[in-house]
């Protein structure tokens, strides 16, 4: 398949100055989203997914953040843009759906005021504050933008959009606020939509409806999507390719079905083994432990304290990437030494054995 990259991230690293020292949160991230492609970053809460996307869109304050690496969007170096140029890009060609709809919408203004501003100005904010207020009070432009907002609210299946447009965010349910955010992100027909765990703060039924809505939008608009989720099942449903992130590092990347049929990193295999199943006799098995402290990460592979295959080689230098084709790679010493090669069934057996006896199995 020929590549046509819309977003191309190379060697992205992010750290933060803090009271407990320097936090090495994201390191050596290479990421690509082609035109018309849906790509998902999957990992546990706290693994660096949201920090990665905020670094991509320039939403991190530097300092305290320290960002290095290359981020190209349609051939443009995003990190070389001025704040105004980046804001224009984010409001026009790049849409963002944030994780928490209540904190993402301004509680002071109505949904209609906020979305109409997006529709009327989008990425075009030239002219300063005086120009903004002059345009905002242009009745014809304002009414046209409001009609676009109503049309988009209907497209995202918002109940009673005529009432919602004059409501404040606090007057809406969680699902309605999430639909308002999706509508806002789509108003200016972005080339790339970044969705950070959409619906994760909602109950299961509403969450499923939001994901179904996004799936329909993806199919209808043929747009590029970069989705963030902790749910590998969600990623399988909507993605063309998946990046697995652990401890701020991409540990595996591959086309979606390849991830599930031939996962190569023990962390990916552990995630697959932990997916609950409604049929069959095999039980789901969890991964003991939690993501590492970023101010004092483990040496070598950051997953080794939780890995059922870990040995001394894993505790040395960070492992290098092993490629399995043009779109697939894993970062694990087991694919470059003479030890046992991790498999999904092998990893699941080791995880369940360790859970049963409370010990670490000797690899």
Image (spheres, helix red, strand yellow):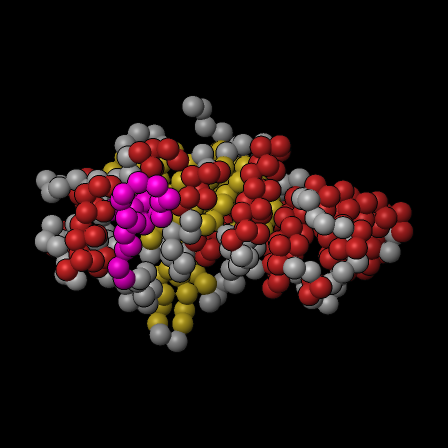
Image quarter (top left, top right, bottom left or bottom right) of the N terminus? top left
Describe residue 157's horizontal placement relative to residue 8 as left or right: right
Q: Could one spot residue 236 in this view of the protein?
A: yes
Q: Residue at x 27, y 44 (%)?
A: 282
Q: Where residue 18 sits in the image (x, y, percent)?
A: 40, 72
Residue ranking furthest to the bottom: 19
Q: Residue at x 48, y 38 (%)?
A: 238
- Residue depicted at x 69% and y 65%: 170
| Magenta stretch in the rendered image | 266-289
Q: Nearer the viewer, residue 13 or 264?
A: 264
Residue 190 sits in quarter: top right
Residue 188 shows up from this direction: no
Residue 95 in the image: state x and y as whole percent.
61, 46
Residue 176 pos. (x, y %): 66, 54
* Residue beneath the point at 34% across and 30% down: 326
- Magenta-colored segment: predominant secondary structure: loop
Q: Going by the image, does 143 lie left or right of 118?
A: right
Front position in the image: 128 or 234: 234
The reply to whether the magenta stretch includes residue 274 is: yes
Q: Residue furthest top?
A: 1
Most extreme residue toward the right is: 139
């Amino acid at each position: 398949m020929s590549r046509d990259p819309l977003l191309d991230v190379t060697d992205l690293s992010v750290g933060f100055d803090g009271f407990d020292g320097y936090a090495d949160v994201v390191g050596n991230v290479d990421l690509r989203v082609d035109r018309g492609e849906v790509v998902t970053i999957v990992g546990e809460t706290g693994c660096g997914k949201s920090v990665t996307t905020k670094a991509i869109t320039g939403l991190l304050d530097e300092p305290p953040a320290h960002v290095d690496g290359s981020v190209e969007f349609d051939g443009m170096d995003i990190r070389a843009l001025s704040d105004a140029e980046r804001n224009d890009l984010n409001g026009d060609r790049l849409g963002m759906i944030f994780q928490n709809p209540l904190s993402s919408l301004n509680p002071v203004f109505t949904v209609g005021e906020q979305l109409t501003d997006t529709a009327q100005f989008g990425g075009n904010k030239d002219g300063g504050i005086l120009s903004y207020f002059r345009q905002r009070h242009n009745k014809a432009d304002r009414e046209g933008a409001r009609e676009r907002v109503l049309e988009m609210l209907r497209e995202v299946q918002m109940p009673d959009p005529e009432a919602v447009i004059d409501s404040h965010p606090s007057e809406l349910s969680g699902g309605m606020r999430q639909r308002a955010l999706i509508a806002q992100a789509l108003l200016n027909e972005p080339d790339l939509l970044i969705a950070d765990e959409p619906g994760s703060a909602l109950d299961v039924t509403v969450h499923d409806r939001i994901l179904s809505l996004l799936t329909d939008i993806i199919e209808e608009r043929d747009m590029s999507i970069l989705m963030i989720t902790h749910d590998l099942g969600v990623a399988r449903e909507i993605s063309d390719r998946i990046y697995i992130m652990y401890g701020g590092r991409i540990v595996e990347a591959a086309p979606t079905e390849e991830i599930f049929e031939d996962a190569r990193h023990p962390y990916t295999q552990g995630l697959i083994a932990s997916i609950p199943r409604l049929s069959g006799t095999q039980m789901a098995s969890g991964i003991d432990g939690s993501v590492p402290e970023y101010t004092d990460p483990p040496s070598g592979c950051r997953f080794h304290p939780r890995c059922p295959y870990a040995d001394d080689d894993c505790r040395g230098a960070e492992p290098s990437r092993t490629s399995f084709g043009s779109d697939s790679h894993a970062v694990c010493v087991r694919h470059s030494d003479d030890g046992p090669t991790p498999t999904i069934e092998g990893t699941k057996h080791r995880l369940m054995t360790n859970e049963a006896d409370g010990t670490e199995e000797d690899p």
